[in-house]
Image (cartoon, rainbow, N blue to C red):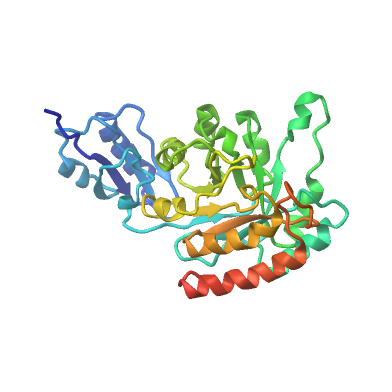
Amino acid sequence: MSVEAPPSLVLVIDPESDERERATILAAAARVRAGALVTSGDGWAAVTLGDGTRGVEAESFRRLPGVLRVVPVSTPYRLAALELFGDRVAVGLPPPQPFRARPKWIGNGRPLTVMVSCSALSDGLPSALRAARDAGATLLFGGEFPPPSTRLGDTVPDISELCRLAEELDLGLCLEVSDAAHIEEVSRVASLLQVGSRNMQDFRLLRALGQAIRPVLLRRGPGATVEEFILAAEYILIHGNGRVILCESGIRTFDAVWRPRLEINALPLIRGATHLPVMADPSTAAPEGAIVPAVARAIVAAGADGLVIEVGEGGGGQGDAAIDVATFTRLMDELRQVASAVGRWE
């Protein structure tokens, strides 16, 4: 006869608790779970006791100064579980110093966040970004840094112009990192660090991002289940960084189209399982730009907190998922209507 495992215990602590209180909490937690750490998010902090909590008296932790409550969690992921707070939380995206862009927020009923990627543009980048900002975009995805070509001997490009544009237009800057060695450097200029879908289970990278000072956008791998996706986020959380945003980027299908297929029904599943904000990328998962608006509208209706949309010249046909600026502007108006209809726009 199988014995049901007891729920794991998570200590939700006062985010304003002082060092002495946290040291006491960690000393008590260490008797149950070696290497316990405080995970800090925006407006919350917690310590997971992990497995092995059978026979542990929750009351002994409730009495500790700085502990707000002790939460039993039954899911394989503890710090990411929705039952930890009973509601969703927001993640702040403060600009790195000395940039003066205003902080951005995503999740927990905040207005829809839209991040634009303009990798297909060159000469028209400033005007396109300005038009996208005016239409409602709040974030700019600047690609992977350093780009893959530098591994083949190319020089590392200067991203100062991209940073200047983001600051001038009051856009938060997101850059992808694929090597833990570059996290500190990228954190000096980016408000948000992205983990590409191919690196969703690069645990060395995830561990390092758990110790980073910047929020993390984690993309779902094309072969990952929803649970595996959230567990990858949990790996970042347990190493200290509570500012994690999930991004549904599509899963592998049996169609001839080489791009992954966006899993719309994953969005309400994720929202029902975790308090973390969730975005989706209709451009990565679209075989052509013509279907991006329809997929984007479905994403908002399904409850996503934000989208990533590729803006370019448009009209590239099969394999080009970018939409032009005029289409993006019309789409933003449509997204507002959809969000309002489902109670998602403030």
Please state if 188 lies on the left or on the right of 237 as rendered. Answer: right
In this view of the protein, which residue sits in the foreground, 304 or 8? 304
- Total numbered badges shown on the rendered structure: 0
Residue 285 percent location from the top left of the image: 61, 48
List the single residue furthest toward the left. 1
When asked about the image quadrant of residue 254, the answer is top right
Please state if 265 lies on the left or on the right of 75 as rendered. Answer: right
When asked about the image quadrant of residue 37, the answer is top left
Residue 195 percent location from the top left of the image: 58, 39
In this view of the protein, which residue sits in the foreground, 214 or 97? 214
In this view of the protein, which residue sits in the foreground, 40 or 225? 225
Q: Is residue 343 above or below residue 195?
A: below
List the single residue furthest toward the right. 123
Please state if 25 lies on the left or on the right of 315 as rendered. Answer: left
Residue 46 percent location from the top left of the image: 35, 45
Residue 149 percent location from the top left of the image: 78, 31
Q: Is residue 138 visible?
A: no
In this view of the protein, which residue sits in the foreground, 272 or 192? 272
Q: Is residue 295 above or below residue 50?
A: below
Please state if 149 lies on the left or on the right of 42 as rendered. Answer: right
Quadrant, the N terminus: top left
Q: Is residue 320 above or below residue 30?
A: below
Q: Residue at x 45, y 72 (%)?
A: 343
When asked about the image quadrant of residue 333, the answer is bottom right
Q: Residue at x 65, y 58 (%)?
A: 291
Q: Is residue 171 visible?
A: yes
